[in-house]
Amino acid sequence: MAKVSSEALGSEPIGKLLIKQALPASIGILVMSLNVLIDSIFVGNWIGSIAFASINVVLPVSFFIGSLGMAIGVGGSSIISRALGAENKEKALQTFGNQISLGFVFMISLVVLGLIFADDIIPKFGGKGDIFEPAKIYYTIILYGVPILGFAMMGNTVIRAEGKPKFAMIAMIIPTVSNLIMDYVFINLMDMGMSGAAWATTGSYLACFLYVFWFFNSKNSELKISFRHFKLQKEIVSEIASLGGVTLARQAVVSVTYLLMNNILYNIGQEGLVAVYAIIGRMLMFALFPVFGVTQGFLPIAGYNYGAHQYQRVRETINTAIMYAAVVATVVFIGLMIFPAEITSLFISDSTNLAPKELALNQYVLSHTAEPMRWVFAATPIIALQLIGAAYFQAAGKAIPALLLTLSRQGFFFIPLVLILPQFYGELGVWISFPIADVLATIVTGYFLNREIRTKLLNSDQIT
């Protein structure tokens, strides 16, 4: 694999560069999404719908703790991209060292608290009734591996900030392949049930971490830190916190969304609707992988060129990224509108050998998921503007607008809607909250992005 310099982010043609950055990111996200998707299919078919719903309960808790690593990674990576663009390598090294120190302190602390309060946390996230016991088994084992995942996710964003998308892609592929192999061995061959699914996932986190650790100790990385870089610097920590807080807030809102959805749907339709949302939640992760890939590819290019004061290239990057993401989002939308029933059937066993309760639950989920899936993805073609717009402010180091725009869809619009609309429209009110929130968030983001381009990027082509 040829060595790539971060300087290419400021010199290659934007269209070619975005494809070069976005394609590996998309493949990596696709493979990781397939990991979640196939893992869910294995669990749903080999263990059952209750187990599938149990994983959906645990997901937001482990997701939030693991996302702390991603938040520290994204916040620091924005600094690293701009520092490399400004040819300030010492700041890039100091930032990377501070990321590692922060990650160790915070992730270990949260895991300890998560284990202590497990019996209180699981029911609050919808782990009630028949779901509680399998959810607790999965939760306890997964939590042991979450700090490892957090460091791997943090390292992955730094690899991308260096302009090494192919290595970042491999880091995302490794846990997927290892998880699927271990799923087959632990669940199907060894019949370990929920504990097998959990140990397979935890083992895959370790495989990813080992690869990331190797990368930064190899000649492929430009960031060779020493012990002095681990000492926390107030200015750097503050900037990591403000920018990483955007990602962490987004993931926190995702976790709150899962909490609300699992509880609201349990109250409306008990385990059945929780399982329906589990399938739709997996598709929200999987189906939009190319859009998220474009967004990930966009970040280092925009950050590097903003740091280098090449504002015309930043404008071009924004326009190209929105165009690419909108095209792939539309293709995804068409597929989901046409094949929702076929997608649902992949997750649920149609075997008649199941216990009567499990068979009845499976039949309910199979017949009840297509219409909600169409509602949830109804506004997919327009989300590119919202995602790229929010990502621009993060890449540019503008923490407050990045935070507000990132939170707009789920925090400012979706959560209030999903609390209000079901009071009037029942279950339908839950599902229509998704496209309404998408439309409102896109309008707000479009306004602020357009104002930023006119006031900053059109009038600042000179170095300021």
Image (cartoon, rainbow, N blue to C red):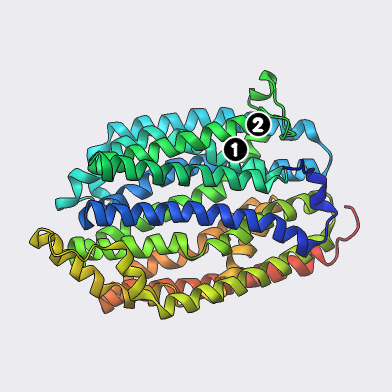
Judge depth for marks 1 and 2 and give the one in front. Answer: 2
Image position of 454 with respect to 102: above or below: below
On the image, the x and y values in percent for residue 5 come to: 79, 43
In the image, 263: left or right of 329? Answer: left
Disc number placed over residue 155 in the picture, else none? 1
Which residue shows up at 78% across the image and 53% down it? 306
Q: Is residue 224 left or right of residue 154?
A: right
Q: Residue furthest right?
A: 462
Please say if 88 is above or below 330.
Answer: above
Give the SS element for disc 1.
helix
Q: Position of residue 15 (x, y in %)?
A: 76, 65
User: What kind of residue is marked 1?
Assistant: Gly
Report the front residue among 171 and 190.
190
Residue for badge 2: 216
Residue 325 in sight here: yes
Q: Report the Cα–Cα distance between label 1 and label 2.
A: 9 Å
Q: Residues within 10 Å of mark 2 (few under 14, many from 20)?
A: some
Query: Residue pushed farthest left?
Result: 356
Residue at the outermost top position: 227
* Along the viewing direction, whichever of 164 and 459 lies nearer the viewer: 164
Element type where label 2 sits in the image: helix
